Image (cartoon, helix red, strand yellow):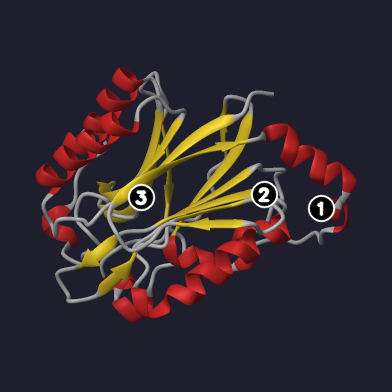
Amino acid sequence: MENLKVTIIQPDIVWENPGENLTNYSTTITAAGKTDLVILPEMFTTGFSMNSENLYELMDGPTVNWMKDTAKFNKTAIIGSLIIKENGKIYNRAVWVFPDGSVSYYDKRHLFTMGQEHLHYSSGKEKLLVEYKGWRICPLICYDLRFPVWSRNTDNIDLLIYVANWPAVRSQVWKTLLVARAIENQVFCMGVNRTGIDGYGIKYSGDSAFIDAKGNANFMNDQPGFMTFELNYQELHSFRKAFPVLNDRDKFTIE
């Protein structure tokens, strides 16, 4: 199986300004060069805003169309979350776009009640398993990271992705839980966060990361930028074969 080249983009999101943010991402993606997958953070066009009624888009709206055009032009997959309205409900939705422009999505299950997210967004009910270039990938969103049962590797996934707007005040929690999710699930784990200060005055320290299945971690600093990593499929599966923790995992049902 071929390795997977993945690019993390860690921005200072311009508050509630999709147009300017998309322009900035286009520039960064061009600078990053050839890659198999581009990962953008949670609510990558707006920041973590509760102004959902004024900021939502549709699945045929400008941001998803930008993702399709960018994916096709750069021959890469792209994922990030944005504010989407569908069937009368508004979701914090992670949209995955394949290089051919086809789309899959995941709606955030665990809404951040301390930030009143549950008052402005509807919760998702189903996880998403993406099969891409032979890899099995599960994308999740920010607060989902705190709930290990939801992240549990029950589908033999290879890569867990968390897109986030995770505040600097809890950066150590972010770092610790990302490493834990990688180790306990024997997966590569990538966390993609933002930097800067949002419209509510909340500071973000970046700390976007790539962690291997043994817990070896590479964290970015608090500056906007990007990093590209090559994920070695054979290395992952050789480790699982030599140390088959997943054979002893518990069986359970999530309600």
Q: In the rendered image, which quarter contains the N terminus? A: top right
Whether pointer 2 and pointer 1 mark residues with C-beta atoms closer than 8 Å, the reply is no
Mark 2 or 3: in front is 2
Instruction: Tell me the element at label 2.
Output: loop
Q: Disc 2 versus disc 1: distance between alpha carbons?
A: 10 Å
Instruction: Tell me the element at label 1.
Output: helix
Q: Earlier in the sequence, mark 2 or mark 1?
A: 2
**Residue at image location 21% in from the left, 49% down from the top:** 45
Residue indicated by mark 1: 246
- Decide if residue 231 is in sight here: yes
Q: Quadrant of residue 178?
A: bottom right
Q: Disc 3 versus disc 1: distance between alpha carbons?
A: 29 Å
Please rate how many residues cluster around mark 1, counting C-alpha atoms within 10 Å: few if below 14, some from 14 to 19, many from 20: some
Relative to the observer, which residue lies in front, 214 or 38?
214
Residue indicated by mark 3: 93
Q: Position of residue 149 (x, y in %)?
A: 65, 65
**Residue at image location 13% in from the left, 57% down from the top:** 16
Q: Position of residue 111 (x, y in %)?
A: 40, 68
Residue indicated by mark 2: 187
Please rate how many residues cluster around mark 3, counting C-alpha atoms within 10 Å: few if below 14, some from 14 to 19, many from 20: many
**Residue at image location 72% in from the left, 55% down from the top:** 214
